Amino acid sequence: MSFFGFNIKKIRTVKKLNQSQFAQLFDLTRSAVGAYEEGRAEAKIDKIIEIADYFGLTLDQFLKKKLTLNEIFKYDSTKALLNYSNTFEPIDFIEHSKFNQYLKNYENNEYVSRLPKIFLPLNNKNLRAFEILNSNTIFDGDVIICEKFETAKPYDLFFFVINDQESFILEKLPPKKLYLQIWKIVSVVNKNTYKYKIFDKLKNLNYEK
């Protein structure tokens, strides 16, 4: 069984592309994209390879399993970082080991102002970064970059939900009474990127404790 159709629909939704826009990227028709997503047709292997390469995926990832949040978003963050501008913005960072402390103090402005920062070339000022462990969705030690939730939009897929004891990554919005804070996940950053500066183009990337 191929997951090609399922995966292009998931990628397209995450990238906020309609079928026509996705089709234009790869010289396809909108009806062909619809047929792939519905399992009524399968693309030729050269087209599958072209799409997989474009999104930084292996054929095994693309065809043999449902893509994870980590696999989809990690491509976004890596591509953005490798094409960065010289402006690195500070993002409040909560390490997993400090999460309980964050739960007790997240409404305390003084506490929030003293949070550690990671610096990434992202322009949005309303971001917060959380280190993730013990998740079925994100690799241990990777960091999710989140935007404070205001209102849900049709293309919003993944949410980081915090209640008074723990946190969850969900693919749909829960009832409001079940959470204290909710964030929309906008990217995933590999732990080696933000801590160890593994890319030559990121020599100026700072990690502030």
Image: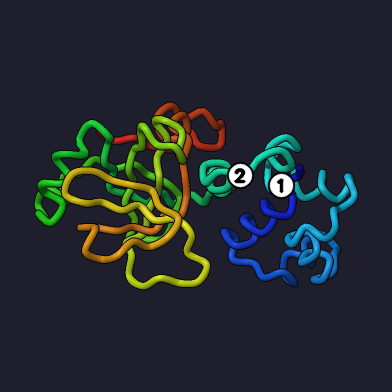
Decide: marks 1, 2 in contact (CB < 8 A)? yes
Q: Does residue 197 appear to the left or right of 79 in the view shown?
A: left
Q: Residues within 10 Å of mark 1 (few under 14, many from 20)?
A: some
Q: Which residue is mark 1?
A: 3
Disc 1 residue type (three-letter): Phe
Q: Which mark is residue 177?
A: none
Q: Does residue 205 appear to the left or right of 114 in the view shown?
A: right
SS of the residue under disc 1? loop
Instruction: Give the distance between the C-alpha atoms of the residues marked 1 and 2, in whole angstroms.
Output: 9 Å
Determine whether 106 is above or below 61 in the image: below
Please state the horizontal and vertical placement of residue 142, each as a whole percent of the image: 42, 35
Please state the horizontal and vertical placement of residue 41, each as a whole percent of the image: 85, 58
Mark sitting earlier along the chain (1/2): 1
Total numbered badges shown on the rendered structure: 2
Q: Does residue 202 appear to the left or right of 128 in the view shown?
A: right
Please state the horizontal and vertical placement of residue 7, each as a whole percent of the image: 67, 51
SS of the residue under disc 2? loop
| Image quadrant assignment for residue 75 | top right
Q: Which mark is residue 67?
A: 2
| Image quadrant assignment for residue 140 | top left
Disc 2 residue type (three-letter): Leu
